[in-house]
Image (spheres, rainbow, N blue to C red):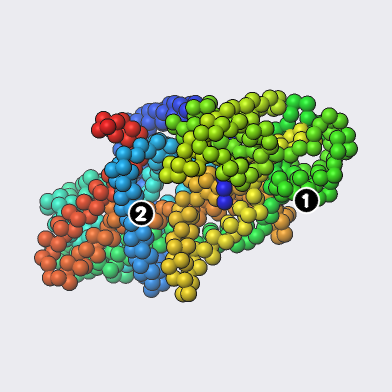
Amino acid sequence: MHNSVINQICRIFRKKTRVIFLQTTTQALIFVFLIYWAVVYLLKKRGVLAKYNISTFGPVVMIETAKGLQYIDKIAAPKRFWRLFANIGIVLMFAGMIFMFSLVVFSDIALIQTILKGVVIEPSEYNELQNIFLIPGINQFIPLVWGIVALIIAIFVHEMMHSVLARAEDIRLHAVGLVFALFPIGAYAKIDDRQLYGDELDNMGEQKEGATDGYNDLTASIEEIREHEQAERDASKKNEAGYEVDGHESVGTVAAETKGAESSKTSGSVEPKVATKNQRSRILAAGVMANFCVALIAAMIFFGPVLGGIQPVGNLQIMGMDDISPSLNSGLMNEMVLTSINGQKITDAESVNQALLTASSGDPIHVRASYNRTVQEYTVIPDPSAENVNYAGILIARVVAGSPAEAAGIQNGMIIYKIDGEYINGMQDFADRMGLKSPGETAVFTIKELDDTTGVSREIEVILGETPGNETKAYIGINYSAGPLYIGLLGITVGEFNAEGYLTFLRSLPSLMVGFDLSDMKGSLLTMLSAWLFILMMPFFGLTGDGFSGFSGAMLSFFEPAGWAEPFGVGIFWAANLLFWVAWLNFYVGLFNCLPAIPLDGGHLFRTYFLKIAEKFKMEEKKAVRLSVRVSGYLTVFIFMSFVIMFVWPHLSGFILGLFG
C-alpha cells in the first residue's frame, strides 16, 4: 500500500517543525527535571524520604514497601499452576531470545555492509535521542496518556509476577518497589539474592566477605539496614528473626509464614532455602510470560470485537479550498470527509469523475460529508466560469541529491499536476507518461505548493537524465506518493486515504501472524515473520510508512463506531487506543527483556542455563560460574554497543566516511 497523501502531508509538516518542537520540549523537560531533582534533594536532606522508607540515587527515587506481601502469598497459593505458567514462559523466553538476538546480529551485518559500500546513512526521526527510550510523551511515536497507562501496566504485571513465582517457590520476598526519575521508569521485586543464587554469589564476587545471611549493604533498604544493625548488637536474639524487631516487621516473618521457608538449624541460626536452577529459571521467566499474556489478551480484544465495532466513513478528506471556492458558502470545511456527490458514493478520483460526469457550471451539486462522525448534505453552486476538471497530481516526498530534478529546482512538498501542459490523473498516469520520455529530452512540469490556496502555479523545465543501470530510460530523480485530488467545480483539494483497506489489513494481522501453511512452508513462514516484525515496528512505520499511534488526530475523521459500539460514540476509539498500547508495550517490554544481556531477565536466564549445561559436562562449579559471568558479560557489551552504534552512526557516518574518502 503506497503512502497516503494525508500521512505524507503530516510527515512533511513534522519535518518543518521538528527542530523548533525539539528545542522547546527539551528546554522545558530540562527545566522541570532540575526542579524535580532539587525537590528530591531537599526532601532527602531533611529526612522526609527516609521517614517513608524512600531511598534515592541522584535523581532516581526508589519507593519501597513490605506492606501487602501477604496478599502476594495468597495469589501464589496454587503453586502447580504458577510453575506450569512459568515453564511455558521459559520456552517462550528462549524463542524471544533467539528472535531478538537475531535482529541485533542482522542489523549489525546490514550496517557493516552499508559502511563497506561507503553509503552515508542520513539521520532521521528514528535515531533521534528522545526516541531511543520508550518514554511516553518524550518519544514522539508514543502518546503521553495512553503510553503512560500502558507502561505502568507493563511494569506492574512484570514485577508482580516475579514476586508471585518467588513465593510459589518458597523464596523470601523482602519488598516490592517502584522507580521514578520524574516519570515511572521501572519497578522491582526485592527477592532474597542469597536464596535465589546461593553460593554462586560468592563465586561471582557479588557478596561481601563474611556475609552469611543474604544481607547486602549496597542494595539493602533503610528498614533492612536498621534490622541488620540491631541484629549485630543483639546476636543472642538471632534465633527469633521471625519476630518484630525495633517496631518493624522483619523479613523473617514473611519467610516463616510460608511452608518450606525454614530448614535445619545449625548453631542457633536458620539456614535459608536455596532455589534450584529450575526454580530460579521459573522466577526469571515469570515477568516476561506475564507481559506476553497481557499483550495477548489486549490484542485479542483490540483485533476482535473493538475493530469489529469500527467502520470507515469515507476515503476523501478536504485539505484545502480556493480563496474564491463556491464551497466556502455551502458550509463545507477543511477536515470534512466526503461520502457522496449527487447521490453517488465516492472513494477515489475515478468515482469523483464518474459522479461529476454530467455536471456543468452553474448547476447545484449535492455533497454529503462527515464531520465529527456526523454526516450532513451540503449544496454547492459552482461558479459559471469554473471548469469541470478533476486531477490528482503527485506529491514530491524526496528529491535525490545531484539529480535532474534538484538541478531544475524541484523541492520536497511540491505537487506536479501537469506534464507538458496535460493534467496528471494519479501516480500510474505519471509513471506511464515518464516511460515515454527519453534521456536528454526536456519535460515541462506544472507545479504548485502543497499549502497554496491561491491557485497560482508555475512551470519548471527539467532536462531528463539516464536511469542508473538503464541508459535508455529517462531519469528525473524524485520519490513521490499520490498527490491530492483537485475537484474543479467545487474548488476544493481532497486527500485520499484508503480507510477501508487500512481497517481490513488491521483485522487480518492476527491471521497473518499464525497463518502457517504446510503446502507453502517457506512462504507462510516468511509471511508470519513479516507480520511479527510489522507488529513490533507498527508505532514507527505503521501501514502507510508513518507510525500508527491509534485512532487519533486526522485518522479519527475517517472512522465511526458501528454495531454494538455505536452507543459508546468516541469511547470506542479511546478503548481501541488503550488496548493497542497495552498490547504493544507489553509485547515489546517482554521481548526486550528476552535479550541475553545483564541485567535483563534474558541475561540471567541465559547464565542459569549456561550453568545447567556446564553441570552436564561435570565442570567445576566455581569455574562454571565465573565462565558464565564472563560469557554473559561479553554478550551484554555486544548488545549494548550494537544499540549505541545503531543510533549514533547515522549522525557520524557522513563525517567519518568523508575522512576516508
Q: Check the picture and name the quadrant holding the C terminus.
A: top left
Q: Which mark is residue 127?
A: none
The residue lying toward the viewer, choosing from 80 and 25, is 25
| Of the image marks 1 and 2, the number of the one nearer the N terminus | 2
Whether residue 302 is visible, yes or no, is: yes
Residue drawn 14% across and 62% down?
624
Instruction: Name which residue type carries label 2.
Output: Leu
User: Residue 597: x and y, percent?
Assistant: 28, 52
Whether residue 157 is visible, yes or no, is: no
In the picture, measured across the screen, residue 518 lies left or right of residue 105, that is right
In the picture, measured across the screen, residue 211 lies left or right of residue 389, that is left
The image quadrant that residue 625 belongs to is: bottom left
The image quadrant that residue 196 belongs to is: bottom left
In the picture, measured across the screen, residue 69 lies left or right of residue 568, that is left
User: Residue 177: x and y, percent?
Assistant: 37, 49
Disc 2 packing (10 Å; few <14; some 14–19; many ≥20): few
The residue lying toward the viewer, choosing from 595 and 218, is 595
User: Residue 584: x and y, percent?
Assistant: 48, 53
Q: Secondary structure at mark 1?
A: strand
Q: Secondary structure at mark 2?
A: helix
Q: Which residue is mark 1?
A: 345
How far is disc 1 from disc 2 in space, using C-alphas?
45 Å
The residue lying toward the viewer, choosing from 230 and 363, is 363
Instruction: Name which residue type carries label 1.
Output: Lys
Q: Which residue is mark 2?
A: 103
Residue drawn 55% across and 50% down?
543
Assess whether mark 2 and mark 1 are in contact (beta carbons under 8 angstroms): no
Q: Nearer the viewer, mark 1 or mark 2?
A: 1
Residue drawn 70% across and 39% down?
391
